[in-house]
Amino acid sequence: MNFDSKSEMENDLAEFLNNNNINFKRNDRKLIRPYELDFFIPEKNLAIELNGLYQHSELSCGKNSSYHYKKYKLCNDKGIKFLSFFQDEYWRKKQIIYNMILCRLNLIKQKRDARKLIIKEISNDKANKFYEHTHISGVCFGSSLNVALVDENEIIHSCMSFQKIQNKFIILRFSNMLNTIIRGGFSKLLNYVIKKYSPKIIETYSDNRFSNGDLYKNHGFKMKNESPPFYFVTNYNERFYSKQFTRPKIKNRFQIDIENKTTWECIKEIGYDRIWDCGKKKWVLELY
């Protein structure tokens, strides 16, 4: 395990910002006292957090379930835009993260109009190949409908995926081609689905680590609720979804006695830790 990877991340991001002539402050301790912000870009009022898996976990460094959420909330209350990335996703999805930062800073130069692109329903395989290179969460599981904006050469510029449950549609993914703004892309894809499939309700979620959900709010969605922070299990090199570490799965994989032990006690016994996110918001568009 590399406990110095947080400083490596910070140096890497500093180099990227410098190469793009973006002025920033490092390790700001004034804006949301008593907490520190790894990066702050004053001209765009944007904070960026880089979370080392060892330095930001609960057992190793005492970062409990509210730690990351509090930093997000303090920034949000002050009108500071907020981005927060974990160590493993930073190194695996670095180009996507660079793109997310440039988008937040309005520094994406290439722009295309959605009206000049063609709507096409595509397979899960094609959608997932696109998401693997454009979305920080990667491939999409459980999709039953994928709609894309393509050009005359069938190149995908934007894609949106849904899970259909009777008259309720859930947006699972939406992303654009890297380094490109698709003007009106979200609207065009959403309106296509509404017109063709007539859903009664469309639901989706925004992750507080990356978004306040303004994209959904601007398209008529209403915030239904905010879910509390969620934890990942970590070995300090990578994160795992908590559903991979239920008590029965821990017992089968690590051959330990789980009787009268909580899931958290079992996780600690096998030498793993947990790291918390910032929570999510649920958005609903009612169409009936």
Image (cartoon, rainbow, N blue to C red):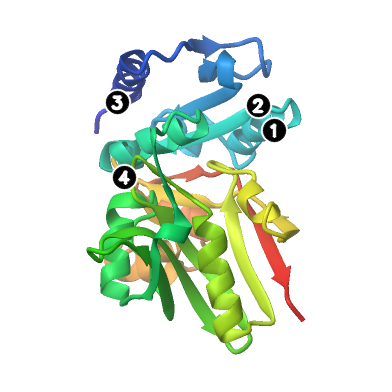
Do residues under tags 1 and 2 come within 8 Å of each other at their CB atoms? yes
Q: CA distance from mark 4 to mark 1?
A: 28 Å
Q: Residue type at mark 1?
A: Asn
Q: CA distance from mark 3 to mark 1?
A: 27 Å
Do residues under tags 3 and 1 come within 8 Å of each other at their CB atoms? no
Q: Where, quadrant-wise, is the C terminus in this rendering?
A: bottom right
Q: Nearer the viewer, mark 4 or mark 2?
A: 2
Rendering coords of residue 56 (x, y %): 47, 32
Identify which residue, 100 or 187, lies in the foreground.
Answer: 187
Residue position marked by numbered label 3 in the rendering: 5
- Where residue 227 sits, quadrant-wise, is bottom right
Mark found first going from the N terminus, 4 or 3: 3
Q: Residue type at mark 4?
A: Glu
Q: Is residue 26 left or right of residue 228?
A: left
Mark found first going from the N terminus, 3 or 1: 3
Q: Residue type at mark 2?
A: Ile
Density class for disc 2 (Cα within 10 Å; few <14, some 14-19, many ≥20) is some
